[in-house]
């Protein structure tokens, strides 16, 4: 009986830890597409959001590549792995920084209204 109560109590605590912060965060999230009136604006918002995500991941990859390099202990294979990770992080950050500009260029080429980002 006591073991069953501990399991139920553990389940209730787990649900509280997962559900309540989600409800609180959901109440504070704003609409990211607010103020968007056309498809071009929607694409700009999406590109900006994805660009921000890629920028965060690129920064994390900078750190990971540094750690890989420091822990390589002179091994050529591990140094090459660290260099590749650094190159991919740089490419990812360049794409992230240019994401809104890429969308604007595509809109201009397609004949849409450029400059909406």
Image: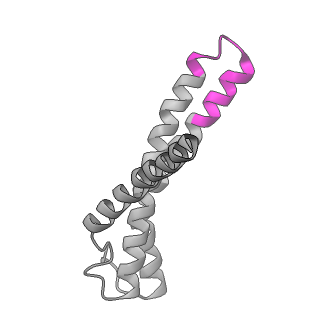
Q: Is residue 49 magenta?
A: no
> Residue 93, can we see it?
no
* Left or right of residue 89, residue 108 in this image: left
Q: Quadrant of residue 15?
A: bottom left
**Which of the two residues, 70 or 105, is positioned nearer the viewer here?**
70
Identify the residue shown where x is 48% and y is 44%: 58
Decide: is 38 above or below 114: below
Residue found 33% across the figure and 77% down from its top? 33
Depth check, front residue: 105 or 40: 40
The quadrant in which residue 82 appears is: top right
On the question of residue 11 being in view, the answer is yes
| Apparent side of residue 34 relative to residue 13 in the rendered image (left or right) | left
Give x and y (percent) for residue 104.
40, 74
What segment carries the magenta color? 69-85
Instruction: Identify the residue at the far right of this view.
Output: 77
Residue 65 point in image, percent of width and height: 56, 30
The number of callouts visible is 0
Q: Could you tell me which residue is drawn at 30 percent across and 74 percent down?
A: 31
The location of residue 4, given as percent across then percent down, is 57, 47
Q: Residue furthest front?
A: 1
């Amino acid at each position: 009986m006591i073991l069953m109560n501990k399991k139920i109590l553990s389940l209730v605590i787990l649900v509280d830890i997962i559900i309540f912060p989600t409800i609180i965060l959901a109440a504070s999230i704003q609409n990211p597409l607010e103020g968007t009136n056309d498809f071009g604006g929607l694409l700009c918002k999406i590109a900006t959001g994805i660009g921000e995500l890629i920028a965060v991941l690129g920064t994390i990859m900078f750190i990971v590549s540094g750690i890989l390099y420091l822990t390589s202990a002179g091994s050529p294979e591990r140094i090459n792995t660290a260099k590749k990770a650094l190159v991919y992080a740089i490419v990812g950050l360049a794409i992230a920084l240019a994401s809104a500009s890429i969308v604007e260029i595509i809109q201009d080429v397609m004949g849409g209204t450029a400059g909406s980002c």
